Amino acid sequence: MIKILYFASLRERLGLASEEYREAPLPGTAGELLAALCARGAIWSETLGDAAAVKIAINQQMASIETPIGDGDEVAFFPPVTGG
């Protein structure tokens, strides 16, 4: 099981703050997880399909689409943040 968290505009668009991903086999990387989520349908691919526009944290550490994930990990997706 992979715990997934969605933040800010991603949470609002998907209507979901968190979920437990249990589909077998579990994805091996954050990019594979994103691809599996995008395959759910239009709103998913529109919201998460641009990997460059989605930031990823795995177990509260910044990560990339190549970062390995495994059973029991927490994966958070959030939009880029701007500041000033």
Image (cartoon, rainbow, N blue to C red):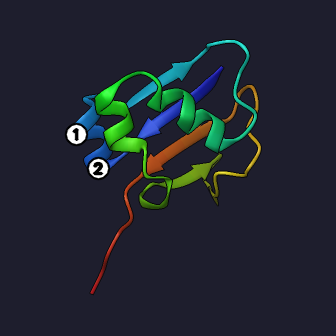
Left/right placement of residue 24 relative to residue 48 reads right
84 to 70, vertically: above or below: below
Q: Which residue is drawn at 58% across and 52% down?
A: 57
Tell how many labels.
Answer: 2
Left/right placement of residue 58 relative to residue 48 reads right
Q: Are the residues at dot 2 and dot 1 in contact (C-beta closer than 8 Å)?
A: yes
Q: Which is nearer the eye, 59 or 43? A: 43
Quadrant occupied by the C terminus: bottom left
Q: Residue at x 58, y 40 (%)?
A: 75
Q: What element carries label 2?
A: helix
Q: Residue at x 47, y 25 (%)?
A: 39
Residue 53, position in %: x, y? 41, 59
Q: Which is nearer the eye, 10 or 35? A: 35
Three-letter residue code for mark 2: Ala
Q: What element carries label 1?
A: helix
Residue receiving disc 2: 8
Residue 15, position in %: x, y? 25, 29
Label drawn at residue 12? 1
Q: Which is nearer the eye, 57 or 46? A: 46
How crowded pointer 1 is (Cα within 10 Å; few <14, some 14-19, many 20+) is rated as: few
Three-letter residue code for mark 1: Glu
